[in-house]
Structure formats: structure tokens, C-alpha cells
Image (spheres, helix red, strand yellow):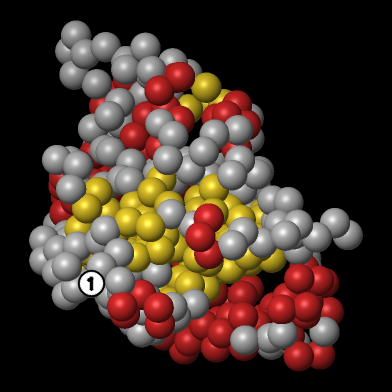
Amino acid sequence: MVVLANPALDEIPLVRPQKHGAFFSAIPVVDLSRPFSAEALVKACEDVGFVKVINHNVPMDVVQRLEAETVKFFEMPQVFKETSGPADPFGYGNKRIGPNGDVGLVEYLLFGITSKPLSYTSMSFLEEPSACLFGPALSEYLVAVKKLASDVLELIAEGLKIEPRDLLNGLVTDEQSDGLFRLNHYPRCPLLERLDRSWTGFGEHTDPQIISVLRSNNTTGLQISLKNGSWVSVPPDQESFFIVVGDCLQVLTNGRFKSVRHRVLANGSKSRVSMIYFFGPPPAGKIAPLSQLMGEGEQSKYKEFTWADYKKAAYKSRLGDNRLGQFEK
């Protein structure tokens, strides 16, 4: 196994964040148990590209079991964690994010997910007795969150009046659908208490897939970029999930939905743990604006591409690059 030297702290970008405690109070919140949740989801995806969902039917004990196992893994000695790395792309990674020079104050586990049967990339640490509860906790979580994503996509299709109603959902539940699951740990960095800047935990980017479903512990750090280019902090909520519009959904809606740029800044007083399930289509799946969503005379803004082509382009780019640019007409 080749072990790459981890980047030094001074290689990680510093940014000047919003003043402490300044949260964006207008994050859309959709109660999935209420009437008109379909219309509310569509409006949130159009306005912000990012929405908090409540009454999501994911049991909190399922979430807590995986979080406990995740924390236990990241508390293990470094030499133990590195037996499951370096990430290429799957496995354990530390500070290096992808192969193209992006770095951040983060360590992570990245799993590839297959749809039917639902399974994930094996890693060496999962064979250790200390990780005997990790696999079952992960499987249980993936099943519950996949159901949530399916419900959300069906509601979005309903709100957009897409026919058939399972068109979007079918892209991520197909037996060939291409998913990723990421567990991120952003360690507490006390040095930040004395600075007016923050180290980047995970640099600004959009998600390439259709949607992402994000959940984190009760720790600040996540920020999104609004349409005017300003960055705002997302108030943490460990009992809710956040739905993130991805690049593919932006294309499918011909730009009606926007894939939101987001980032994570390191925290000076508390570590952050986040879980993100990325829902992608099958590699051969064709992505193009849906004609039924385009008005009379409206032109397609994007060339058709396959998910395999787009993923290949995405993995060649830096985090902050505009990956969709090369597919615009």
C-alpha cells in the first residue's frame, strides 16, 4: 500500500467566515407529513437548491447508531484508520479530497453504493472485531435514507407534474444506479479561537449527482452560497435532513432548479460529523432537460450526456470548478 504524506496545516486554505453566530434564518423547511409538501419542495429547489425536511420517517435510533460507530472509528489510532486507505476513490482519506490537489481539515470514509441488492464497498477495518456493529448500522441507515430520497424525488415529480411520477425516483432506484456515501469528520481546531479566519474543512463545490441527503451532528460549519454570491451559515439540526440539489437535477429541469454551492468551515470548539448519501443515476443513464418541463419555444440549455461521461469529467476537475460549463449549449 502506498501511503501519501498528508498536507500540512498551512497548505489548507483560510477563509474569512460570517461573524460568529450569524445564521441564515430563511433556510426552507418542508414538513413531509403535510399537504402541499410537493409544491413546497419544488419552490425550495427553485429558490435555494437546498431544503431542510422534517417528519422524514427516518428513525432517530438508526441515525444515532451509525453516528456512534462513526465517532468510534474516527477516534481510533491513525495507523488503524489508514489500513483502509488511501481513498482511491473509496476508503479512508485524511485532508486530501480527490486526486487534483484539493485539501481540507477533514478525514473521511467514502463508500461506493450499489442499488439492488443494496451493498457498499468493503474496507479492511470492517473485518476487525471492534467494527462488528459498524456494518449493520451502515446498512440500516442506507436503507432508511434511500427510502427518504425516493419519497422526496416522487414529491418533486408530483410538484413539477412530471409523468410518469416515478421518472426521477427510477433513476436512483434502478439496479444499476450509482451511489456514494460519505462520512466526514472535521476535528475541533482550538487555534481558530484566536483567529478571525477559519480553515477550510471541505472546499466550495456543487454535488454532481441528482440529489444528496445530508445529516450532521449539532455542530456549525456548513455554509451555502445564495444566488447573489454571499455565503450564509446553516443552523445545525441533528434531527433533520437536508436535501441538496445536484448538477444532474439542474440539467433535468433545464436550470429551473440550481445545484447549490456549499462548503464546510472548521470549528474551533467542537468536532463535526456529517453523513451524506449521494444519489446518482446508472452510468449509462442519459441526462438532458426533460421536454415536458420546458415551455413553448424554450430552448434546451444543456447538451445530453451520460452519467458516466459527467462523472469522468467531474473527477478530472477541482472541487470549485464549474463542471456543467462544458455541457452548456
Question: Badge 1 is on which residue?
Answer: 235
Residue 276 in view (yes/no): no
Name the quadrant containing residue 55: bottom left
The residue that appears at 30% across and 26% down in the rendered structure is 254
> Left of 176 or right of it: where is 148?
left
Residue 15 x %, y %: 32, 56
Q: Is residue 86 above or below residue 248?
A: below
> Left of 192 or right of it: where is 169?
right
Outermost residue on the left side: it is: 26
Residue 325 x %, y %: 40, 23
Residue 329 in view (yes/no): yes
The residue that appears at 14% across and 40% down in the rendered structure is 228
Name the quadrant containing residue 23: bottom left
Residue 179 x %, y %: 58, 51
Under circle 1, the secondary element is loop
Name the quadrant containing residue 96: bottom right
Q: Exactly how many numbered labels are in the figure?
A: 1
Who is closer to the viewer here, 303 or 294?
Answer: 303
Residue 234 x %, y %: 24, 66
Who is closer to the viewer here, 295 or 227?
Answer: 227
Within 10 angstroms of label 1, few (less than 14), some, or many (20 or more) residues? some
